[in-house]
Image (cartoon, rainbow, N blue to C red):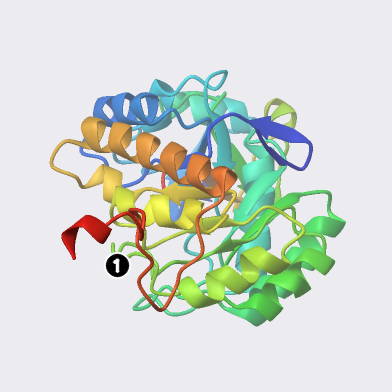
Amino acid sequence: MKIICNGQEREVAPATTITGLIRELGLNPETVVAEHNGRVLAREEHEFILLDEGAVLELIRFVGGG
Amino acid sequence: MLTIAGKTFRSRLFGGTGKFSSPQVMKAALLASGAEMVTVALRRVDLDDPGDDIMRVLDRERFFFLPNTAGARDAGEAVRLARLARASGGGNWVKLEVTPDPRTLLPDPVGTLKATGELVKEGFVVLPYINADPILALRLQEAGAAAVMPLGAPIGTNKGLVTAFQLGIIISQAQVPVVVDAGIGAPSHAARAMEMGADAVLVNTAIAVAGDPVRMAAAFAKAVQAGREAFEAGLGAEREEAEASSPVGGLDFLR
C-alpha cells in the first residue's frame, strides 16, 4: 500500500507501524518524532499506530540551529 | 546565577548549533564556550541522507536543549513546530521565532504575541525572539513569557548592538530575564550587552563562522563573564567634562 512520507510517495507493507517504518528507513526511533495525518504523536504512540493506505506522515528531528 | 522559569544556569552565554563546519567542531566550540543552554532547530528528516543526525554528538546531560521555531512564518506554524519539539523529547521549553520575511528575518510582533499566549496556555516555557521593542517586551511578560530575547541586529549580520538604546529600556523595565539574541558579532558586543545589564546573550553565527570557532567560543565566554562582573561591580557614571584622575593640588613648586 502507498503512503506519503515527508512529501514522497512510498510503498509500505500492510500492518507497518510508525516505529517499523522509522527502523526500515534506517533512522533511530529515539530521535525522530512523527506527525501523522496532521497530528503530532508522542513518541510512545509510534509503535501502536498502524499506517493506513494514503496516510500522510512527517518524520522530523532536531538539527543545528540558532 | 541566572534563573529562568525556576531552572538555574551558571553560564550566561547561550550557544547555537547552526552553521558549524562539522558536528565535531560544534561540540568542541560549545564545550569551550561553557554554555549550558543550546538552541536547536527542527526539520523534516532528509530520507535521501538519513544518517545525518548531527545532534547525536551532544550529550543531553551536559547541554540543555532549547528548541527554536526558526522558519515559522506565522503563529500557527510556530505553535506546530513547538508541539513537535515537545513530542521529540525536547522538554517544554521553546525559543519562539515568527519571521515572515526571509530577507530580514525580523520577528512579527503580532504573531509572536499570539503564539506566546497559545503556547503558555499549553504549558510551554516560552522565550520569544523579538525586535528590541520595550512595549512588546512588557506585553509578552504579561502574556507569560519566561524571558524575552530582543535582537541586537538582524540574525546572522554580526553588526552588534544596533538597538542599544531600546535594549537599555527593555533591561530597565523587565521583570523576566532579558537574553540579547541575534546580531552579536564580536566578544566586545557581548561584553557590552552584559555591562548594560542583560541577563544573558545568545551567540551562534559569530562563533560558528569564526576562523577558529573553538578559540572564538572561549573568547566569548570571557567577554560575557567580564561584562557581567562589570555590571555587578557598578560602572562609573559618564560625564560631559574631564575630571582629573591625579590630584589637582600640590603643583605649587612648578609655578
Residue B205, x across and y down, in percent: 31, 51
Residue B142, x across and y down, in percent: 83, 68
Residue at 69% from the left image edge and 26% from the top image edge: A47
As drawn, the residue found furthest toward the left would be: B211
Q: Is residue B152 above or below residue A45?
A: below
Residue at 22% from the left image edge and 32% from the top image edge: B215
Give the residue type at disc 1.
Lys
In-image side of B248 versus B85 (left or right): left
Residue at 59% from the left image edge and 38% from the top image edge: A33
Q: Is residue A3 above or below residue B216?
A: below
As drawn, the residue found furthest toward the right would be: B121
Callout count:
1
Q: Classify mark 1: residues with Cα within 10 Å, few (<14), some (14-19) or many (20+).
A: some
The quarter of the image holding the N terminus of chain B is: top right
Residue B197, x across and y down, in percent: 57, 55
Q: Secondary structure at mark 1?
A: loop
Q: Quadrant of residue B137?
A: bottom right
Q: Answer whether residue B93 is visible to the viewer in this image.
A: yes
In-image side of B91 versus B200 (left or right): right
* Residue highlighted by disc 1: B159
In depth, the one of B57 and B186 nearer the eye is B186
Residue at 54% from the left image edge and 34% from the top image edge: A32
In-image side of B54 versus A62 (left or right): left
The quarter of the image holding the C terminus of chain B is: bottom left
Residue A53, x across and y down, in percent: 61, 48
In depth, the one of B136 and B84 nearer the eye is B136
In-image side of B150 versus B86 (left or right): left
Task: Report in which chain the residue with disc 1 lies.
Answer: B
Q: Answer whether residue B67 is visible to the viewer in this image.
A: no
